[in-house]
Amino acid sequence: MTILLSTLNARYAHASLGLRYLLANMGALQAQTELHEFVIGAKTTEIIERLLARQPRIIGFGIYIWNVEETTRVVAMLKRVAPQVTIILGGPEVSYEPGEQAIVQLADYLVTGWGDVTFPALCGQILNGPKPLMKIHTGVQPPMAEIKLPYSLYTDNDIAHRTIYVEASRGCPFKCEFCLSALDKTAWPFGLDAFLAELEGLHARGARLFKFVDRTFNLNIKTSLKIMQFFLDKLAAHPDDPVYAHFELVPDHLPDALKEGISKFPRGALQFEIGIQSFNPEVQALVSRRQDNAKAAENIRWLSAHSNAHLHVDLIAGLPGEDLASFARGFDQLVALGPHEIQFGILKRLRGTPIIRHTEQYGMVYDPYPPYTILATSLIDFATMQRVVRFARYWDLVANSGRFATTLPYLLGDAPFDQFMAFSDWIYGQTDATHRIALDRLAKLVSQWLQTRGMTRAGADALVAQDYAGKHDAPATSVPSRQARHLAA
């Protein structure tokens, strides 16, 4: 093969939608282009050996916040053992602030932003001349109708074993400063008929789990209803072979027509990711987030009470201007609304995002290494932030995992944040760990904690046993936080 497209995915189950878009739009070069995906943690030499076995002239790497460090090692070694191979980079992590990145210095070329048109054109120039003189090439955004959709490039193995990412639109009209979508001017839809035809083809080939990466699925209600009707039709026609769809919702935009459509879905067929991020109006204004908090709360409450959708709601800790007490109030308010999961995310300084403008005034201190997590602010010191990070991890293990649904209300009481923070501090003191805690041990620790709060041993053990019986291998259902998820394509 002349051209290889490659990336290191966070997990095997994640299939790169972005690389499949590139492959679909290679034009005359598609026949000599191959896709080779790896998973972070793979041995660098083995990755390089597999790539070079195809004798490529060009390798294009998709660079993301989760793989930039490992891919830097891959590119550095490639340049030592195969300097004749041209390396092209693309992806959100290298599209902004490229001048200070070691991987960009190592590579031959960089395509920033949209690569659908620019990457194939650059490959053609490298192969056929004249050789490009400039290292950095700004991606050209073509009309949406001219972008070839990539869904036929999901293999049968992908469909059988991996998450199928799809998008009915790109971009976002909102300007939340912690998100790369803040740099978009608007949202651009794909042709709906063509898109639905692609979904039909995927379903015919056996795809049943569809994860939409659209930033604002419910922005255009007519489009939302047509897409939901596609899935409702499949559920009606194949009740014994159900589909599952994951969408991101704007929290304060849920008109009656959309509620009616949502109410028709049976349990286990629909998941919504809903970004609240903060309930503090002053913090929302600081990060340019427009949100009607009362309407958002009303909509989440309605979804909890009147739909079968699984609700995954996001909060971000460490935003400028928000102290721990403010975050705790928002957390408690969200718990009271009854979502199935609360994704307790920690702010990350994604390259290129406008959040950087608050650094000095609000004492924002970020980890200099990926994923650039907030370490401290003027209102939350480092030690407290570490407590918050541990809270988030234990919340995933105990609450979001679904393994302790009966026990959780007893852990939270009438002050959910404060009570769970106390539990978090205690369990860390007992284990000195946030990972690799066996479920057997975790169950015993939960019981012991309840006993420290006045419950009898028999009562605590019986309560935990109600959740724990038969759930040794119960999977967690949480999805990446909004900040990370928007990079998945």
Image (cartoon, helix red, strand yellow):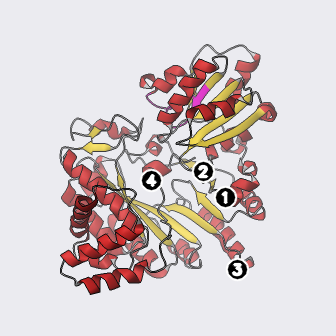
**Circle nearer the N terminus (2, 4):** 2
The three-letter amino acid code for the residue at tag 1 is His
Is disc 1 placed on a helix, strand or loop?
Answer: helix
Distance in Å between CA atoms under marks 1 and 3:
21 Å
Q: Which residues are magenta?
A: 88-97
Q: To which residue does mark 3 refer?
A: 239
Q: Are marks 2 and 1 in contact (CB under 8 Å)?
A: yes
Query: Which residue: 43% across, 77% down?
Result: 304
Instruction: Examine the image and state in which quarter residue 406 appears.
Output: bottom left
Is disc 2 placed on a helix, strand or loop?
Answer: loop
Q: State the image coordinates of residue 253 (x, y, percent, origin top left).
A: 46, 65
Q: Are marks 4 and 1 in contact (CB under 8 Å)?
A: no
Instruction: Evaluate whether residue 382 shows in this view.
Output: yes
Task: Give the numbered dot on residue 161.
Answer: 1
Instruction: Answer few, some or many: residues within 10 Å of disc 3's Cα (few below 14, many 20 plus, some between 14 and 19).
Output: few
Disc nearest the viewer among 2 and 4:
2
Distance in Å between CA atoms under marks 3 and 4:
31 Å
Task: Give the numbered dot on residue 414.
Answer: none
Q: In front: 168, or 270?
A: 270
Q: To which residue does mark 4 refer?
A: 482
Instruction: Answer few, some or many: residues within 10 Å of disc 2's Cα (few below 14, many 20 plus, some between 14 and 19).
Output: some
Task: Give the numbered dot on residue 12.
Answer: 2
Instruction: Evaluate whether residue 380 shows in this view.
Output: no
Query: Which residue: 22% across, 72% down?
Result: 415
Is disc 3 placed on a helix, strand or loop?
Answer: loop
159 lies left or right of 353: right
Instruction: Examine the image and state in which quarter residue 29 appears.
Output: top right
**Circle nearer the N terminus (3, 4):** 3
